[in-house]
Structures are given as C-alpha cells and as structure tokens.
Image (cartoon, grey):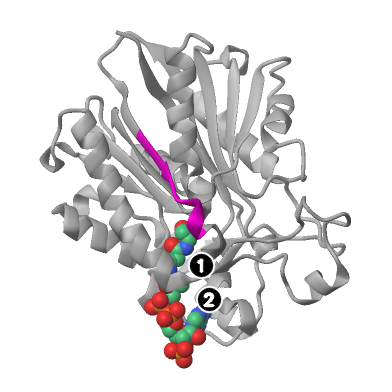
Amino acid sequence: MTRSRIIGTGMYVPPFVVTNDDLSRRIDTSDEWITERSGIRERRWLETNAEGWTLQTGAEMGAQAAREALAAAGIEPEAVDLVLYATLNPDLFFPGNGVFVEDLLGLQTAGAMDIRNQCTGFVYALAAADGFIQAGIAETVLVIGGEIQSTALDVSDQGRDMAVLFGDGAGAVIVQKSDSESGILASALHSQGRYARDLYCEAPVGNRSDRITPEMLQQKRHYPRMDGKLVFKHATRRFCEAINEVLAQGGMATGDIDLLVPHQANQRITDAVGARMGLSPERVFSNIAKYGNTTAATIPIALAEAEREGRLRDGDIVVTVAFGSGFTWGANLIRW
Ligand code: UT7
C-alpha cells in the first residue's frame, strides 16, 4: 500500500524576540493580561529597515525551514517534485510564495502551489500532499507553512486584541511516497463560509476598481479583525470533532494518540481540547509561550520542535488539528 510519509522536518523563526513587556510599552496591554488570556509570553517578529521593508521575505524564511527539512530527510533539493506553501500572507499579491521557494532552492521546474487557508493551511496542505502522492502526480512534496504576521498587525490600542497574539516564522516537512506502514492515514477538511467575516482581512480587495482607497487605509481596513469570543467557542468544538473524525477513519480511539499537535492559537483552547479529549498534558504539544500564533506555521514548527525533543518516534500515532479564518478546520492522522 502506498503511504505518504513525513521523512524530515525543519523550522525557522526570526531572531528578534518581542516580549509581552515590549508590547505593553507600545500599547495599552500587560504581560499579565496576555499570559492569562492566551499563554503567550513572547513571539518573534522580523525586523524592518528604515524604509519599512522586512530584513527577510516570507519565502526566505520558508526556504530556510525547507533546507533544514531536506537535511533531516537526507535528500537533495532536486528530489522535490512539488512545493506546497501554506500562508495567508504571501510576499506579493501574486504569484504565491511557493514559486519563490522553488527558485531559492534551485529546483528548476518543480511544481509549486500556494494554499491560502489561514490557520488551517498546513492541515489542508498535508492532505493535499497525500492526495497528490496517492494520485501518482508527485513522489516527494515539500510542504511549508509560513507567515509574516508582524507587518499585518495594528500595533495600537485599537488593534491590541490581535496584535499581542501573532508571530512570524516558518516550518517545513518533506512528504514522500513510501511502502512502509508509516505515513498519513487519514485527513478531515471542513469550512463554513458564513463565518468568513468573523475573522478576516478586507483589504486590498479584488472586487474594487482601485483595490484600496485612502479611506480604507485610514479606517485600518487592511488590518485583520476578529470576533475573538466566537472564534474561541467554535475552535474548541471543531478541534474535538476533527480529531474524532480522523480517529474514526483510521479505526482508532483517543487512547491511541501518542502526541496531539494542535494549531497554537491560544493555550486555553489547547487546554480545553486536551481536557475534553481526555489527553494528559504530556500528550499535547505546546510552544505558544515562545512564538505566539504563527498561523499556517504553528503545526510544522511544532512538528520540528517535537522531533528535536525526541517526542516523535517511529510508529507513534500523531494527530495534527487546526481551526481558523473561513471558518476552516481539519485534522490529519499520521503514523510517524
Ligand atoms: O487561530 C485562530 C485565530 N484566533 C483565535 O484563535 C483567537 C480566539 N480567541 C481568543 O484567543 C480570545 O478570545 C482572546 C485572547 C482574543 C481574547 O480573550 P477573551 O478572554 O475572549 O477576552 P475579551 O475579548 O472578552 O476581552 C476582555 C477585555 C475587554 O475589555 P472589556 O470590554 O472587558 O473592558 C478587551 O477590551 O480585555 C480587553 N482586551 C485587552 N486588554 C489588555 C482585549 N485585548 C487586550 C489586550 N490587553 N491585548
């Protein structure tokens, strides 16, 4: 039987650390509020030059994570025949970041595609990689989740609900066709567009002749907005549903999970999901305290760190699960 196996993981986060105290010097917030409400203590933000350009692009962060994943997998970049790049913040309006990574890695003519599914992007991308491999379209897929969130935030009192939550970074995995028992066993993908405007960024817009107006900029409609409480409520419920769905597809139960790797949105969401699923804290991965919510990058960064920490051993049953803007949500069941 053909399986799509993760054979290498990698990550990259920018070196510049922004603590909760750093933020509380810029906006009306506090370390106590942020830690208590979200579990976040610090995040990494790309530094910018005098003209406001970030010192690295999103694609450069993705390529760094990819190089680490390729080295861990012990394969040369040329072996990759498809790049899937999950991000809600591509460097340009188009083309997506996948083609820039393809070029940065010197891949010549490998396929490249961006998946714009926000916090759920990496879960969708893993399922897509599995689908392409099962269909015989690709054999070695580089899957990246990466975000520059720092330039997309309203770092003012008005935007404080979101500004304190997000960070920059990228993670990558190599998914390869395999005859072994290990690999992606099941995936569940869902969305509910009726909630699209409960967590979204409006501008620039495609359906306006000028795409963005001075008024829209003045009204800060190019910054994301969310109904935090509504997102929280739906996320907790959908995480559990998606985990149960992939377990059922794989003929497994919660007791089979060795490690749950949830999207890192809020430590309170992670704790609530762990408790509802009856998983002890050692079986639920968390690194939100260090990086905040890096959106499509949280799960691949978590996988890379979990592997480094020796928490992913051959044969382990791992579940990745995410929820985010769209609303979108989903999960993957993986035998490591
Ligand atoms: O990956 C998916 C993306 N997003 C999420 O998953 C986010 C899900 N939601 C959440 O994580 C939480 O709803 C938040 C962390 C965003 C907020 O926590 P909360 O417990 O739901 O707080 P709240 O929105 O009810 O706000 C409570 C108070 C408000 O003040 P009043 O109206 O009670 O006077 C806010 O204005 O906290 C205030 N507040 C802040 N105070 C200090 C909001 N943001 C901040 C802040 N610092 N940064």
Circles 1 and 2, Cβ within 8 Å, touching? The answer is yes
Assign a secondary structure to mark 1: loop
Q: Which mark is residue 161?
A: 2
Q: Is residue 334 visible?
A: yes
Quadrant for residue 178, please give it.
top left
Check the image and name the residue furthest to the front: 194
Quadrant for residue 59, please give it.
top right
Q: Looking at numbered disc 1 in the image, what kind of residue is underneath it? A: Leu
Q: In terms of image quarters, where does ligand 1 lie?
A: bottom left
Report which residue position mark 1 lands on. Answer: 165
Identity of the residue drawn at 53% across and 11% down: 137
Q: Quadrant of the C terminus?
A: top left
Q: As drawn, is 239 to the left or to the right of 9?
A: left
Give residue 12's position: percent from left, percent from top: 56, 44
As displayed, is residue 238 above or below residue 333? Answer: below
Identity of the residue drawn at 25% across and 57% down: 273
As displayed, is residue 199 above or below residue 100? Answer: below
- Mark 1–mark 2 distance (CA, rounded to whole Å): 8 Å
Q: Mark 2 near ligand 1 (CB under 8 Å)?
A: yes
Give, as a single range, the part of the protein colored magenta. 188-195
Q: Mark 1 near ligand 1 (CB under 8 Å)?
A: yes
Nearest to the observer: residue 96 or residue 307? 96
Give residue 123's position: percent from left, percent from top: 43, 39
